[in-house]
Image (cartoon, rainbow, N blue to C red):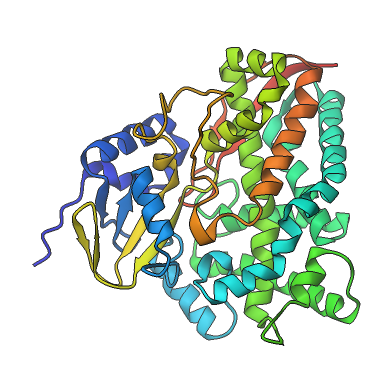
Protein backbone atom coordinates (compact mmCIF):
# COMPACT_ATOMS: atom_id res chain seq x y z
CA UNK A 1 0.00 0.00 0.00
CA UNK A 2 1.30 3.46 -0.89
CA UNK A 3 1.12 5.52 2.31
CA UNK A 4 2.92 8.59 0.97
CA UNK A 5 1.18 11.81 1.84
CA UNK A 6 1.65 15.17 0.18
CA UNK A 7 2.54 18.34 2.02
CA UNK A 8 0.27 21.16 0.84
CA UNK A 9 3.33 23.41 0.37
CA UNK A 10 4.74 20.96 -2.19
CA UNK A 11 1.93 21.76 -4.62
CA UNK A 12 3.88 24.83 -5.75
CA UNK A 13 6.19 22.63 -7.83
CA UNK A 14 3.24 21.67 -10.03
CA UNK A 15 1.98 25.25 -10.27
CA UNK A 16 3.65 27.41 -12.95
CA UNK A 17 2.13 30.57 -11.44
CA UNK A 18 4.11 30.03 -8.22
CA UNK A 19 7.27 31.38 -9.87
CA UNK A 20 5.41 34.60 -10.69
CA UNK A 21 4.58 35.08 -6.99
CA UNK A 22 7.87 35.26 -5.08
CA UNK A 23 6.35 35.68 -1.62
CA UNK A 24 4.20 32.56 -1.98
CA UNK A 25 7.02 30.59 -3.57
CA UNK A 26 9.64 31.34 -0.93
CA UNK A 27 7.23 30.81 1.96
CA UNK A 28 6.50 27.31 0.65
CA UNK A 29 10.16 26.53 -0.03
CA UNK A 30 11.23 27.68 3.45
CA UNK A 31 8.55 25.45 4.99
CA UNK A 32 9.70 22.45 2.96
CA UNK A 33 13.40 22.99 3.75
CA UNK A 34 12.56 23.04 7.45
CA UNK A 35 9.92 20.35 7.66
CA UNK A 36 9.87 18.19 4.52
CA UNK A 37 13.11 18.52 2.51
CA UNK A 38 12.35 15.37 0.47
CA UNK A 39 8.72 16.06 -0.35
CA UNK A 40 6.40 13.75 -2.24
CA UNK A 41 4.53 15.49 -5.07
CA UNK A 42 1.61 13.75 -6.76
CA UNK A 43 -0.21 16.45 -8.67
CA UNK A 44 -1.67 15.94 -12.15
CA UNK A 45 -1.03 16.68 -14.96
CA UNK A 46 2.51 15.72 -13.87
CA UNK A 47 3.68 12.25 -12.93
CA UNK A 48 4.71 11.90 -9.26
CA UNK A 49 8.17 12.87 -8.03
CA UNK A 50 10.13 13.80 -4.92
CA UNK A 51 11.07 17.48 -4.52
CA UNK A 52 14.57 18.05 -3.13
CA UNK A 53 14.91 21.45 -1.46
CA UNK A 54 18.16 21.37 0.54
CA UNK A 55 21.42 22.59 -1.05
CA UNK A 56 23.53 19.67 0.19
CA UNK A 57 21.05 17.08 -1.12
CA UNK A 58 20.91 18.70 -4.55
CA UNK A 59 24.72 18.64 -4.70
CA UNK A 60 24.91 15.01 -3.55
CA UNK A 61 22.45 13.91 -6.23
CA UNK A 62 24.21 15.90 -8.97
CA UNK A 63 27.54 14.42 -7.90
CA UNK A 64 26.29 10.81 -8.07
CA UNK A 65 25.55 10.87 -11.79
CA UNK A 66 25.88 7.09 -12.09
CA UNK A 67 23.01 6.59 -9.63
CA UNK A 68 20.88 9.61 -10.57
CA UNK A 69 20.24 9.73 -14.31
CA UNK A 70 19.00 12.51 -16.58
CA UNK A 71 17.20 10.05 -18.84
CA UNK A 72 14.33 9.56 -19.27
CA UNK A 73 13.01 12.59 -17.34
CA UNK A 74 15.49 15.50 -17.28
CA UNK A 75 12.96 18.23 -16.48
CA UNK A 76 9.40 18.62 -15.28
CA UNK A 77 6.78 18.25 -18.00
CA UNK A 78 3.21 17.01 -18.04
CA UNK A 79 2.64 13.29 -18.47
CA UNK A 80 1.14 13.97 -21.90
CA UNK A 81 4.17 16.02 -22.96
CA UNK A 82 6.55 13.34 -21.62
CA UNK A 83 4.77 10.65 -23.64
CA UNK A 84 4.77 12.76 -26.79
CA UNK A 85 8.49 13.56 -26.41
CA UNK A 86 9.28 9.85 -25.99
CA UNK A 87 7.27 8.95 -29.09
CA UNK A 88 9.00 11.65 -31.10
CA UNK A 89 12.44 10.42 -30.06
CA UNK A 90 11.53 6.86 -31.00
CA UNK A 91 10.53 8.24 -34.39
CA UNK A 92 13.90 9.99 -34.71
CA UNK A 93 12.41 13.48 -34.49
CA UNK A 94 12.57 14.52 -30.82
CA UNK A 95 14.77 16.67 -28.64
CA UNK A 96 17.83 15.13 -26.94
CA UNK A 97 20.12 17.88 -25.72
CA UNK A 98 23.04 17.71 -23.30
CA UNK A 99 20.60 18.04 -20.41
CA UNK A 100 18.80 14.89 -21.58
CA UNK A 101 21.95 12.74 -21.81
CA UNK A 102 24.01 10.64 -19.42
CA UNK A 103 27.66 9.60 -19.61
CA UNK A 104 29.47 8.35 -21.58
CA UNK A 105 27.42 9.76 -24.49
CA UNK A 106 26.89 13.06 -22.68
CA UNK A 107 30.64 13.47 -22.16
CA UNK A 108 31.43 12.76 -25.82
CA UNK A 109 28.79 15.14 -27.15
CA UNK A 110 29.72 17.88 -24.67
CA UNK A 111 33.34 17.84 -25.91
CA UNK A 112 32.23 18.99 -29.36
CA UNK A 113 31.30 22.45 -28.12
CA UNK A 114 33.51 22.67 -25.04
CA UNK A 115 36.45 24.48 -26.67
CA UNK A 116 34.16 27.37 -27.64
CA UNK A 117 33.54 28.13 -23.97
CA UNK A 118 37.05 27.69 -22.53
CA UNK A 119 39.02 30.67 -21.10
CA UNK A 120 40.96 31.38 -24.32
CA UNK A 121 37.77 31.48 -26.37
CA UNK A 122 36.19 33.77 -23.79
CA UNK A 123 39.14 36.15 -23.97
CA UNK A 124 38.86 36.25 -27.75
CA UNK A 125 35.11 36.92 -27.52
CA UNK A 126 35.35 39.65 -24.88
CA UNK A 127 35.91 42.44 -27.40
CA UNK A 128 32.62 41.57 -29.12
CA UNK A 129 30.78 41.23 -25.78
CA UNK A 130 32.06 44.62 -24.57
CA UNK A 131 31.07 46.20 -27.88
CA UNK A 132 27.53 44.83 -27.57
CA UNK A 133 27.30 45.98 -23.95
CA UNK A 134 28.13 49.53 -25.08
CA UNK A 135 25.59 49.27 -27.90
CA UNK A 136 22.78 48.36 -25.53
CA UNK A 137 23.66 50.92 -22.87
CA UNK A 138 23.75 53.50 -25.68
CA UNK A 139 20.32 52.24 -26.72
CA UNK A 140 19.05 52.92 -23.19
CA UNK A 141 20.17 56.52 -23.67
CA UNK A 142 18.41 56.74 -27.04
CA UNK A 143 15.05 55.39 -25.87
CA UNK A 144 15.12 56.90 -22.35
CA UNK A 145 14.25 58.25 -19.90
CA UNK A 146 11.92 55.24 -19.57
CA UNK A 147 11.85 51.74 -21.02
CA UNK A 148 10.79 48.18 -20.35
CA UNK A 149 14.26 46.89 -19.61
CA UNK A 150 13.33 43.28 -20.41
CA UNK A 151 11.65 43.88 -23.77
CA UNK A 152 13.97 46.68 -24.94
CA UNK A 153 17.40 45.62 -23.66
CA UNK A 154 17.81 42.41 -21.67
CA UNK A 155 16.42 39.96 -24.22
CA UNK A 156 18.52 41.33 -27.09
CA UNK A 157 22.00 41.81 -25.66
CA UNK A 158 22.77 38.13 -24.83
CA UNK A 159 20.82 37.03 -27.90
CA UNK A 160 23.24 38.95 -30.12
CA UNK A 161 26.22 37.46 -28.26
CA UNK A 162 25.22 33.81 -28.69
CA UNK A 163 23.96 34.26 -32.25
CA UNK A 164 27.29 35.87 -33.16
CA UNK A 165 29.09 32.88 -31.63
CA UNK A 166 26.98 30.48 -33.66
CA UNK A 167 27.57 32.55 -36.78
CA UNK A 168 23.92 33.14 -37.63
CA UNK A 169 22.87 36.11 -39.80
CA UNK A 170 21.55 39.10 -37.86
CA UNK A 171 18.27 39.13 -39.77
CA UNK A 172 17.45 35.74 -38.18
CA UNK A 173 17.96 36.91 -34.56
CA UNK A 174 14.34 38.04 -33.97
CA UNK A 175 13.10 34.68 -35.22
CA UNK A 176 15.38 32.87 -32.74
CA UNK A 177 14.12 35.10 -29.93
CA UNK A 178 10.47 34.39 -30.72
CA UNK A 179 11.05 30.62 -30.94
CA UNK A 180 12.99 30.62 -27.68
CA UNK A 181 10.21 32.46 -25.85
CA UNK A 182 7.67 29.99 -27.25
CA UNK A 183 9.80 26.97 -26.33
CA UNK A 184 10.42 28.02 -22.71
CA UNK A 185 7.13 29.90 -22.35
CA UNK A 186 4.65 27.06 -22.63
CA UNK A 187 3.13 28.03 -19.27
CA UNK A 188 3.13 31.79 -19.90
CA UNK A 189 0.17 33.37 -21.69
CA UNK A 190 2.31 36.09 -23.30
CA UNK A 191 4.70 33.60 -24.90
CA UNK A 192 3.11 30.21 -25.47
CA UNK A 193 2.05 28.95 -28.87
CA UNK A 194 -1.21 27.07 -28.49
CA UNK A 195 -2.45 25.04 -25.54
CA UNK A 196 -1.65 21.43 -26.45
CA UNK A 197 1.64 19.50 -26.45
CA UNK A 198 1.21 19.00 -30.20
CA UNK A 199 1.09 22.77 -30.75
CA UNK A 200 4.15 23.22 -28.56
CA UNK A 201 5.92 20.49 -30.52
CA UNK A 202 5.52 22.61 -33.65
CA UNK A 203 7.87 25.17 -32.06
CA UNK A 204 10.52 22.47 -31.88
CA UNK A 205 9.85 21.47 -35.46
CA UNK A 206 10.37 25.10 -36.54
CA UNK A 207 13.74 25.07 -34.79
CA UNK A 208 14.67 21.77 -36.42
CA UNK A 209 13.72 22.93 -39.92
CA UNK A 210 15.87 26.05 -39.50
CA UNK A 211 18.88 24.20 -38.12
CA UNK A 212 18.61 21.35 -40.61
CA UNK A 213 19.21 23.87 -43.40
CA UNK A 214 22.07 25.34 -41.39
CA UNK A 215 23.66 21.91 -40.93
CA UNK A 216 23.56 21.20 -44.65
CA UNK A 217 25.14 24.59 -45.40
CA UNK A 218 27.92 24.25 -42.77
CA UNK A 219 28.81 20.72 -43.88
CA UNK A 220 29.05 21.86 -47.48
CA UNK A 221 30.96 25.06 -46.66
CA UNK A 222 32.41 25.00 -43.11
CA UNK A 223 33.13 28.36 -41.47
CA UNK A 224 34.91 29.45 -38.30
CA UNK A 225 31.94 29.44 -35.95
CA UNK A 226 30.23 27.22 -33.39
CA UNK A 227 27.54 26.19 -35.88
CA UNK A 228 30.23 24.58 -38.07
CA UNK A 229 31.78 22.84 -35.05
CA UNK A 230 28.41 21.27 -34.23
CA UNK A 231 27.53 20.38 -37.84
CA UNK A 232 30.88 18.69 -38.39
CA UNK A 233 31.39 17.26 -34.90
CA UNK A 234 32.19 13.56 -34.77
CA UNK A 235 32.08 10.80 -32.17
CA UNK A 236 34.18 7.72 -32.93
CA UNK A 237 34.61 9.03 -36.45
CA UNK A 238 30.89 9.39 -37.10
CA UNK A 239 28.98 12.65 -37.51
CA UNK A 240 26.41 13.39 -34.83
CA UNK A 241 22.99 11.88 -35.46
CA UNK A 242 20.37 14.28 -36.81
CA UNK A 243 18.62 14.35 -33.43
CA UNK A 244 21.82 15.08 -31.48
CA UNK A 245 23.07 17.66 -33.97
CA UNK A 246 19.83 19.61 -34.18
CA UNK A 247 19.29 19.34 -30.42
CA UNK A 248 22.78 20.78 -29.83
CA UNK A 249 21.85 23.86 -31.85
CA UNK A 250 18.60 24.25 -29.92
CA UNK A 251 20.17 24.15 -26.46
CA UNK A 252 22.91 26.63 -27.42
CA UNK A 253 20.57 28.97 -29.29
CA UNK A 254 17.99 29.06 -26.47
CA UNK A 255 19.62 28.51 -23.08
CA UNK A 256 22.65 30.39 -24.41
CA UNK A 257 20.80 33.69 -24.17
CA UNK A 258 17.46 33.29 -22.38
CA UNK A 259 18.95 32.40 -19.00
CA UNK A 260 21.47 35.24 -19.19
CA UNK A 261 18.79 37.79 -20.03
CA UNK A 262 16.86 36.70 -16.93
CA UNK A 263 19.98 37.11 -14.78
CA UNK A 264 20.69 40.59 -16.17
CA UNK A 265 17.14 41.86 -15.69
CA UNK A 266 16.85 40.19 -12.29
CA UNK A 267 20.19 41.69 -11.30
CA UNK A 268 19.14 45.19 -12.31
CA UNK A 269 15.90 44.88 -10.39
CA UNK A 270 17.84 43.76 -7.30
CA UNK A 271 20.13 46.79 -7.56
CA UNK A 272 17.16 49.15 -7.92
CA UNK A 273 15.39 47.62 -4.93
CA UNK A 274 18.59 47.64 -2.86
CA UNK A 275 20.00 51.13 -3.52
CA UNK A 276 22.67 50.75 -0.83
CA UNK A 277 24.13 47.82 -2.81
CA UNK A 278 23.90 49.80 -6.05
CA UNK A 279 25.90 52.65 -4.52
CA UNK A 280 28.35 50.21 -2.97
CA UNK A 281 29.02 48.62 -6.35
CA UNK A 282 29.32 51.96 -8.12
CA UNK A 283 31.82 53.11 -5.50
CA UNK A 284 33.85 49.90 -5.67
CA UNK A 285 33.85 48.35 -9.18
CA UNK A 286 36.26 45.66 -7.92
CA UNK A 287 33.18 44.02 -6.39
CA UNK A 288 31.75 43.30 -9.86
CA UNK A 289 32.73 39.57 -9.93
CA UNK A 290 31.00 38.85 -6.61
CA UNK A 291 28.07 41.08 -7.60
CA UNK A 292 27.60 39.02 -10.77
CA UNK A 293 27.49 35.79 -8.75
CA UNK A 294 24.92 37.33 -6.40
CA UNK A 295 22.74 38.43 -9.34
CA UNK A 296 22.87 34.88 -10.72
CA UNK A 297 21.96 33.39 -7.31
CA UNK A 298 19.21 35.95 -6.74
CA UNK A 299 17.50 35.38 -10.12
CA UNK A 300 18.14 31.61 -10.51
CA UNK A 301 16.88 31.47 -14.14
CA UNK A 302 16.84 27.65 -14.32
CA UNK A 303 14.36 26.61 -11.66
CA UNK A 304 14.89 22.87 -11.73
CA UNK A 305 16.23 19.76 -13.33
CA UNK A 306 15.13 16.23 -12.59
CA UNK A 307 16.93 12.94 -12.06
CA UNK A 308 15.72 9.33 -12.02
CA UNK A 309 17.10 6.70 -9.65
CA UNK A 310 18.97 3.88 -11.40
CA UNK A 311 18.69 1.68 -8.29
CA UNK A 312 16.83 1.63 -4.99
CA UNK A 313 18.29 4.31 -2.74
CA UNK A 314 17.30 6.96 -0.20
CA UNK A 315 17.69 10.68 0.45
CA UNK A 316 17.66 11.85 4.09
CA UNK A 317 16.28 8.46 5.05
CA UNK A 318 13.40 8.66 2.57
CA UNK A 319 13.34 5.48 0.43
CA UNK A 320 13.30 6.09 -3.32
CA UNK A 321 12.87 3.15 -5.67
CA UNK A 322 14.64 2.54 -8.96
CA UNK A 323 12.73 4.37 -11.68
CA UNK A 324 11.35 7.05 -9.38
CA UNK A 325 12.26 10.68 -10.04
CA UNK A 326 13.50 13.61 -7.98
CA UNK A 327 13.06 17.31 -8.72
CA UNK A 328 16.13 19.40 -7.88
CA UNK A 329 14.89 22.80 -6.72
CA UNK A 330 17.71 25.21 -7.51
CA UNK A 331 15.67 28.16 -6.26
CA UNK A 332 15.29 26.55 -2.86
CA UNK A 333 18.95 25.46 -2.75
CA UNK A 334 20.08 29.01 -3.57
CA UNK A 335 18.20 30.40 -0.56
CA UNK A 336 19.08 27.60 1.88
CA UNK A 337 19.72 29.05 5.34
CA UNK A 338 22.22 26.26 6.08
CA UNK A 339 24.52 27.50 3.30
CA UNK A 340 23.87 31.22 2.81
CA UNK A 341 24.15 33.78 5.59
CA UNK A 342 20.94 35.83 5.48
CA UNK A 343 19.92 34.37 2.09
CA UNK A 344 17.24 37.01 1.48
CA UNK A 345 19.77 39.83 1.78
CA UNK A 346 21.06 40.91 -1.64
CA UNK A 347 24.81 41.38 -1.07
CA UNK A 348 27.09 42.40 -3.96
CA UNK A 349 30.10 41.35 -1.88
CA UNK A 350 28.77 37.92 -0.85
CA UNK A 351 31.73 35.56 -0.53
CA UNK A 352 31.62 32.60 -0.53
CA UNK A 353 28.61 32.22 -2.79
CA UNK A 354 28.04 28.54 -3.49
CA UNK A 355 24.93 29.03 -5.62
CA UNK A 356 23.74 26.22 -7.87
CA UNK A 357 22.31 28.32 -10.69
CA UNK A 358 24.67 26.63 -13.17
CA UNK A 359 24.02 23.17 -11.79
CA UNK A 360 26.78 20.99 -10.40
CA UNK A 361 28.86 18.01 -11.42
CA UNK A 362 29.09 16.64 -14.96
CA UNK A 363 26.11 18.71 -16.10
CA UNK A 364 27.57 22.03 -14.91
CA UNK A 365 26.48 24.65 -17.44
CA UNK A 366 28.69 24.63 -20.53
CA UNK A 367 28.20 28.37 -21.04
CA UNK A 368 28.72 29.53 -17.43
CA UNK A 369 31.89 31.50 -18.21
CA UNK A 370 30.18 33.28 -21.12
CA UNK A 371 27.15 34.19 -19.01
CA UNK A 372 29.37 35.61 -16.27
CA UNK A 373 31.35 37.64 -18.78
CA UNK A 374 28.21 39.06 -20.42
CA UNK A 375 26.68 40.14 -17.10
CA UNK A 376 30.00 41.62 -15.96
CA UNK A 377 30.49 43.54 -19.21
CA UNK A 378 26.97 44.96 -19.19
CA UNK A 379 27.04 46.31 -15.64
CA UNK A 380 30.66 47.46 -16.00
CA UNK A 381 29.43 49.61 -18.92
CA UNK A 382 26.17 50.72 -17.30
CA UNK A 383 27.07 51.72 -13.75
CA UNK A 384 29.70 54.44 -14.43
CA UNK A 385 27.16 56.15 -16.72
CA UNK A 386 24.19 55.77 -14.40
CA UNK A 387 23.04 58.94 -12.65
CA UNK A 388 19.66 57.72 -11.38
CA UNK A 389 17.32 54.77 -11.76
CA UNK A 390 14.00 53.67 -10.28
CA UNK A 391 11.06 51.45 -11.06
CA UNK A 392 8.47 53.04 -13.35
CA UNK A 393 5.86 50.37 -12.73
CA UNK A 394 5.40 46.94 -11.22
CA UNK A 395 7.90 44.23 -12.30
CA UNK A 396 6.17 41.15 -13.73
CA UNK A 397 7.51 37.60 -13.53
CA UNK A 398 6.67 34.84 -16.00
CA UNK A 399 4.79 31.68 -15.08
CA UNK A 400 7.02 28.65 -15.62
CA UNK A 401 8.10 25.28 -14.27
CA UNK A 402 11.54 25.29 -15.89
CA UNK A 403 13.30 28.46 -17.12
CA UNK A 404 12.05 31.94 -16.38
CA UNK A 405 12.35 35.31 -14.75
CA UNK A 406 11.12 38.81 -15.37
CA UNK A 407 8.93 39.33 -18.42
CA UNK A 408 8.59 43.08 -17.78
CA UNK A 409 10.76 45.55 -15.85
CA UNK A 410 9.57 49.16 -16.38
CA UNK A 411 12.29 51.60 -15.32
CA UNK A 412 12.92 55.34 -15.27
CA UNK A 413 16.55 56.47 -15.42
CA UNK A 414 19.14 59.05 -16.31
CA UNK A 415 22.38 58.08 -18.08
CA UNK A 416 25.46 60.04 -19.08
Question: Residue 9, how many percent across, how many down?
Answer: 27, 41
Question: Residue 117, how many percent across, how many down?
Answer: 72, 56
Residue 206 visible in rendering: no
Q: Compared to 64, does 296 lie above or below? A: above
Q: Identify the residue at image location x=74%, y=17%.
A: 413
The residue closer to the viewer here, 57 or 221, is 57
The residue closer to the viewer here, 83 or 366, is 366
Question: Residue 49, how many percent across, how many down?
Answer: 30, 60
- Residue 112 horizontal side relative to residue 214, left or right: left
Q: Identify the residue at image location x=85%, y=50%.
A: 124
Q: Compared to 353, does 330 lie above or below? A: below
Question: Residue 284, how many percent across, how many down?
Answer: 70, 17
In the displayed orientation, state which residue is furthest to the left.
Answer: 1
- Residue 244 horizontal side relative to residue 383, left or right: left
Q: Quadrant of the N terminus?
A: bottom left
Residue 340 visible in rendering: yes
Quadrant of the rendered image containing residue 54: top left
Q: Identify the residue at image location x=37%, y=33%.
A: 26
Q: Quadrant of the C terminus?
A: top right
The residue closer to the viewer here, 57 or 165, is 57
Q: Compared to 162, does 384 lie above or below? A: above
Q: Compared to 27, does 206 lie above or below? A: below
Q: Identify the residue at image location x=72%, y=55%.
A: 118
Count of numbered circles in the view: 0
Amino acid sequence: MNTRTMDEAARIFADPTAYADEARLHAALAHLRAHNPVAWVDQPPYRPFFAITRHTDVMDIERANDLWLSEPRPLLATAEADDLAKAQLEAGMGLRTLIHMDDPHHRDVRKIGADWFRPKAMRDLKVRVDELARRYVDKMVEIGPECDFVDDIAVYYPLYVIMSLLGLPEEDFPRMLRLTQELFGGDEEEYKRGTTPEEQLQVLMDFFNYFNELTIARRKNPTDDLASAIANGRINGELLSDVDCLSYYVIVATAGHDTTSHAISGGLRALIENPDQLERLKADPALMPTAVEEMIRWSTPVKEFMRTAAADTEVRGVPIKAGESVYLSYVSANFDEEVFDEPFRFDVGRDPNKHLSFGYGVHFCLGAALARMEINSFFTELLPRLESIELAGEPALASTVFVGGLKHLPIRYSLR
